[in-house]
Image (cartoon, rainbow, N blue to C red):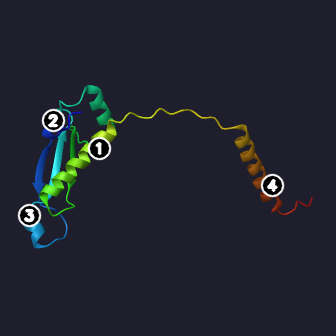
Amino acid sequence: MDVDLLKSELTFKAVRSSGSGGQHVNKVASKVVLYFNLEKSTVFSEEEKNRLRAFLKNRLNKQGVLILYADESRSQFRNKTIVTQRFLELVEESLKPEKERKPTKISKAEKRKRLDNKRKHSEKKTSRKKPNID
């Protein structure tokens, strides 16, 4: 994956941050919004795009655009760095190969132990019942 080419496909927009903060927040556009169009990307192969689509299915909009934002800092530059780093981590995480599951078997001793505990618990409960006088 070519990080520089990937960064060149990103679109940034600076907007006013929400929330409290008084006069500073009302006049400075420090919140940074990152847009990445997965469908138009040339960095990834079709297989990688499918993996990204599956991993980011709840984060992509209908046009296949990923929108991330950062407004933690009062600095626009720092927010841009934060959101870019977050994006790169997301992409890296989604392209990791999944570990293959190795099917395991429950041992006989474990089965026996579970059934013994189940039986003891059952006996404990039945011993608490009132005796049946008939």
Tell me, yes or no, whether the two marked residues, 1 and 4, touch with CB atoms within 8 Å: no
Badge 1 element:
helix
Q: Label 1: which residue? A: 90
Q: Which mark is residue 123?
A: 4
Residue drawn at x 21%, y 47% as measured from the top left: 67
Mark 4 burial class by Cα count in 10 Å: few <14, some 14-19, many 20+: few
Mark 1 burial class by Cα count in 10 Å: few <14, some 14-19, many 20+: some
Residue 86, x across and y down, in percent: 25, 49
Between tags 3 and 4, which lies in front? 3
Q: Label 3: which residue? A: 28
Between tags 1 and 4, which lies in front? 1
Residue drawn at x 19%, y 70% as measured from the top left: 20
Measure how far apart labels 3 and 2 are at the Cα level. Answer: 30 Å
Query: Which of marks 1 and 2 precedes in the sequence?
Result: 2
Between tags 4 and 2, which lies in front? 2
Mark 2 burial class by Cα count in 10 Å: few <14, some 14-19, many 20+: few
Closest to the observer, 126 or 25 = 25
Measure how far apart labels 4 and 2 are at the Cα level. Answer: 68 Å
Disc 1 marks a residue whose amino acid type is: Leu
Query: Which of marks 2 and 3 precedes in the sequence?
Result: 2
Residue 29, x across and y down, in percent: 10, 60
Q: Label 2: which residue? A: 5
Query: Which of marks 4 and 3 precedes in the sequence?
Result: 3
Tell me, yes or no, whether the two marked residues, 3 and 1, touch with CB atoms within 8 Å: no
Residue drawn at x 12%, y 58% as measured from the top left: 76
Badge 3 element:
loop
Left or right, 52 with respect to 124, comes to left
Badge 4 element:
helix
Measure how far apart labels 2 and 1 are at the Cα level. Answer: 16 Å
